Structure formats: C-alpha cells, structure tokens
Amino acid sequence: MNDLASPAPLTPLAALAALLAPEGRALLDEVRGTRPDQELSVATRLRRDHPADLVSAALAQARLRQRAAAKFGAVDAERMFFTPNGVEQSTRTTVATYRAERFRALGVTSVADLCCGIGGDAIALARAGIRVLAVDRDPLTAAVARANAAALGLSELVEVREADVTGIDTAPYDAVFVDPARRGGRGRIFDPEAYSPPLSWAVEAARSAPRAALKIAPGIPHETVPAEAEAEWISDGGDVKEAVLWFGTEPGGSAARVRATLLPGPRTLAGRGLPDPEVRPVGDYLYEPDGAVIRAHLVAEVAEEVGGGLIDETIAYITADELRPTEYATAYRITDQLPFNVKKLKALLRERAVGVLTVKKRGSAVEPEELRRKVKPQGPNAATVFLTRVAGAPTMLVGHPAEPVRPV
C-alpha cells in the first residue's frame, strides 16, 4: 500500500510562477493555438513528460490568451499572462492607448494607476513614455501585472505594488488614474458607492492630484458627475466601452463639460449645452447617433450638425430631409414608414425581394430575432427596418444605409 499523499494542486500564484519558469514557458510555446477539441489529446501527450498541474495551467493560459487577443491584439496576447477576471475586466488596448495619449498631451510624465488589474492601462501609459506606479491589492493580479510589464519590456517604466490603494501616497506623481472594481460576487455593480473602492473615495483621490482620470460605467447618471469634472464617454467600433471623469484638464478647473469620443480616430464631439431638438415628421433620412453620443446626451449637437430633428421626444433617432456629413452618426435613406404591423412589413419585404434584413430597435419591446422569424425574408436584396416610435406611435421605418457624404 502506498502511503504517500498526492501532491497538493498548484495554487494560482504557484501556477503563475511555474509558467514563468523555463519549463512553463516551453510548455506555453508548445500549446499555443490549441483548439478546444484538441485539448484532451494534447494534455494526454504532454503529461507523459511534465507535471499534470503544469500542463493544465499552460492549457488554461493558452485559452485565456486566445480570448484576450480581441482586446490586446494577438501579438501582445501571446506574450502576456491573464486571469479570467483580468480578461473580462481589462481595458481594450485601443481605449487604453487613447487615454494614455490624452494624459501625455496634458503634460503628464508619471501616473499612479490605482486598481491596476492585470496591467492593461499601465502598459498603455508606459508605451506613451509615462512612468507608472501600478497598484492592486490582490496578490495574483499584482503578480500578473508585474509579469506582463516584464513580458512586454516595460519593467523600467512600470513599478507594480501589491497594496490597498487607499493607503498609497500619490503626491509624487503628476496624475492619478483609478479604475474601481465594478463587479462583485453577484455580477455587475450599478451603485457607484458599491464600487471597490467607492466612487466617492476615487473622486477625493482625483481632487488631490494635479490631473486625474476615473474610469466608470457608461450608465452613470449625469447628475452624479462632480461639478469640476469633465465627463467623457468612449466608444470603439460603435460599441460604448466606458465613461471617464477627468480632473484638471484645464488650469484652475472649469465648469462641467461633456464630450463623446469615437474610436478609431479619435473623433471627439464636445457638448455645447444645446436645448433638445424639436420633434419633426420623418424625412428622407434617419441618423442613428453613436452610442457614446447618446450616453453623453449630445444628440442635439448632432441634430444641429445635420440640420435635423427628433422623430419622437424620447427616442434618439434624428430625421432630416437631406444628407449631410457627420462623423457621429450613421445615416440611412428611409423608403417606407408603416404603423407597426408584421403582416404589412412581410408583404412589403416580399414585394421588394428582401432576403437580408437588418433589424434595429429603439423604444420597442419587439426582439429583432422574433420579427425576423415572423417575416421570413427571402430574396437577393437587403433592407434595414427600425422598430421605434414616431410622435408616440409604434412605427416601422424601412430603408438602407446612405452613401457617406465627405466633408467639403
């Protein structure tokens, strides 16, 4: 009888240390690109010559790297290290790079990155030539951030510290960046005071620094934005990614400001405090503002730009009689306006031989897939249908993307 106990499984920290060692790095190279359907055979083969726990850790890291490629790019992701939460919560590289460039444009040369996670923002800041103190209280997360800075050759610019951010002296740094945890054991946290650390603490930390940026959820109510902060909503490829509260962007501070920034670009629309646009009958064109524009409450600025109005006082669709260039909305040529009626829509689509149907909705409870199943589009042509309200009435607008107009 064998009295020897089985070795204890590797802790996450021990697994990371093992992957950083020569044997672990060699395994990571060997499992690169492994597909899910190949994992069992690959694991069986590698466990003949390597500890089972190390093989499992390498395969798990390979899966995370494949997921992370969408945020970090394949080249960086293949060199970096990740945790499941790190992949989920880290900032997309395009957004982090934009923010780092804005810090640099403000003259910032050093940043205290509080709640740094696996180091995505610290990496972007360092690549912009900014010295970074990256702080996280979780031992594994801090170790991963340190490994990532080393993997990308940025250790000289990035100091990673495992500590509670509330005890960090940020006075030696030009700026503070805070990315509070917005997820808990039950999922996403919507109350800013339930962030870790709370938003109120982050605001006070920002006020104590010459420059600061606080990353927050894009759904934050506008009335909670501090009076001296600039609120910026950022989208990437049409998807709203985050909101940022900036402090100290102008010498001496200023009145509250709002902006929407669209990536790639960047293309930035600044708020001018315009009143809500008037409601008009549906014209020849419909403009769908980018999500960052809508979140920033800057639909009026786009409406003025295209000479349009709203189709309904509660709906963020802009209508106009002519096509004008704008970088902040997508334009559609409207061919038909119908009261909500699935049979009439089905007949219209059959008449137009529409087989490729894009369904968009705003102010409607109908799900796009449900409508698509009911109308059963068939044919060689394409169309877009908007399920919405016009002057309070449920309405279907049918059209297609308009040819872009280039600014003169």
Image (cartoon, rainbow, N blue to C red):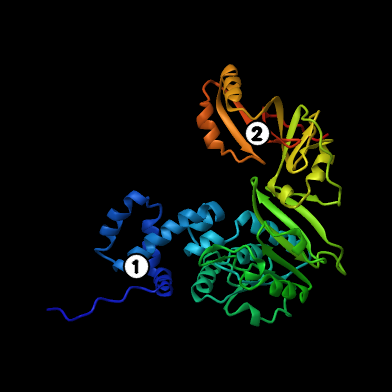
Question: Of discs 2 and 1, which sits in the foreground?
Answer: 2
- 196 to 80, vertically: above or below: below
Tally of marks: 2
Residue 179 location, quadrant: bottom right
The image quadrant where one finds the C terminus is top right
User: Real-space Cα distance between discs 2 and 1?
Assistant: 52 Å
Q: Is residue 199 left or right of residue 105?
A: left
| Residues packed near mark 1 inside 10 Å, few (<14), some (14 to 19) or many (20 plus) | many
Residue 347 location, quadrant: top right
Residue 214 appears at what percent x and percent y? 70, 66
Q: Is residue 1 left or right of residue 71?
A: left
- 403 to 141, vertically: above or below: above
Residue drawn 53% across and 59% down?
88
Three-letter residue code for mark 1: Leu
Disc 2, SS = strand
What residue did someone put label 2 on?
386
Pointer 2 or 1: first along the chain: 1
Residue drawn 59% across and 32% down?
358
Residue drawn 67% across and 56% down?
218
| Residues packed near mark 2 inside 10 Å, few (<14), some (14 to 19) or many (20 plus) | many
Q: In front here: 284 or 130?
A: 284
Residue drawn 86% across and 68% down?
251
Residue 274 circle label: none
What residue did someone put label 1 on?
54
Q: In front here: 216 or 168?
A: 216
Q: In front here: 224 or 166?
A: 224
Three-letter residue code for mark 2: Phe
Residue 335 appears at what percent x and percent y? 70, 23
Residue 146 location, quadrant: bottom right
Disc 1, SS = helix
